Image (spheres, helix red, strand yellow):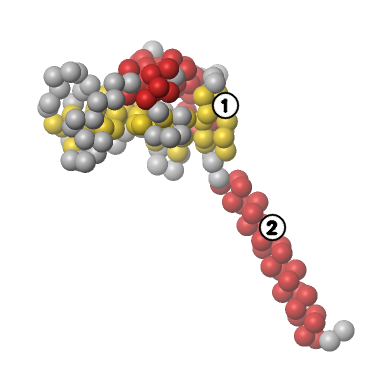
Amino acid sequence: MDEKIQVAILVIVALIAFGFAYTQFAQGAAEKENTVNGIKVFARGSVKSSLAQILSPQVIATQVVFDNASDNRPCKVPMQTEALYGLVSSGKNASLQIFVADQKYCLKSAGANSSERVECAKPQVVIQTGECDCMRVDTRNQTILVSGSESWLCSSGPQVREIIAWGIKKE
């Protein structure tokens, strides 16, 4: 067999092997869709262990994202309340803050008259409107993103609370 043909065959085999290995690695690193308690949850690896890792500190910061100061989407705050309940009922100390995205500042609490600006803490749980209607458990950024439509945020709070409490619970 001609030497050039042998080299070409070896190069093709090496490229196929590299492509297969890369595909296998990429699939392992990609988020996988899971359904937990009726909620879509995206995570790399085990949902339970990923939640446990992110929620392991004793003090957990939660944050509701508002697009601007006049954003009036009332279901974000009840969703945050459910997340807080899941944390506190599991023995965690939880803080809450509102992040006003267009001005890039935080407010101390979700109270109706809350106007005290505070330094934004790095949140472990973030609630925002979006198209996902899901939770994204991101161990790289140590964040759980709860994102959905207004109607989903209104109706899914109890399930999200239970998922958070389940993630903390030692088995």
Q: Residue at the far right: name it.
A: 1
Q: Is residue 104 above or below residue 14?
A: above
Query: How far across and down, in percent of the image, does residue 22 sit?
Result: 63, 57
Residue 152 is marked as none
**Residue highlighted by disc 2:** 20
| 35, 139: nearer the viewer | 35
SS at mark 2 in the image: helix
Residue depth check, mark 1 versus mark 2: number of the one nearer the observer: 1
| 6, 35: nearer the viewer | 35
Q: Is residue 5 above or below residue 52?
A: below
Residue 35 is marked as 1
Query: How far across and down, in percent of the image, does residue 159 sit?
Result: 47, 17
Quick one: label 2, few (<14), some, or many (20+) residues within 10 Å? few
- In the shown orientation, is residue 11 left or right of residue 115? right
Question: In which quarter of the view is residue 78 placed?
Answer: top left
Tell me the quadrant of the picture where the C terminus can be found: top right
Tell me the quadrant of the picture where the N terminus can be found: bottom right
Can residue 59 be seen from the camera position used here?
no
Mark 1 or mark 2: name the one nearer the start of the chain. Answer: 2
Question: In which quarter of the view is residue 85 placed?
Answer: top left
Q: Residue at the far top: name it.
A: 89
Disc 1 to disc 2, how far (Cα)?
A: 28 Å
- In the shown orientation, is residue 136 left or right of residue 78? right
- In the shown orientation, is residue 73 left or right of residue 87? left
SS at mark 1 in the image: strand
Q: Residue at x 45, y 39 (%)?
A: 139
Q: Residue at x 45, y 38 (%)?
A: 138
Query: How far across and down, in percent of the image, does residue 10 sit?
Result: 76, 74
Q: Residue at x 22, y 21 (%)?
A: 110
Q: Amino acid at mark 1?
A: Thr
Are the residues tagged 1 and 2 within 8 Å (C-beta)? no
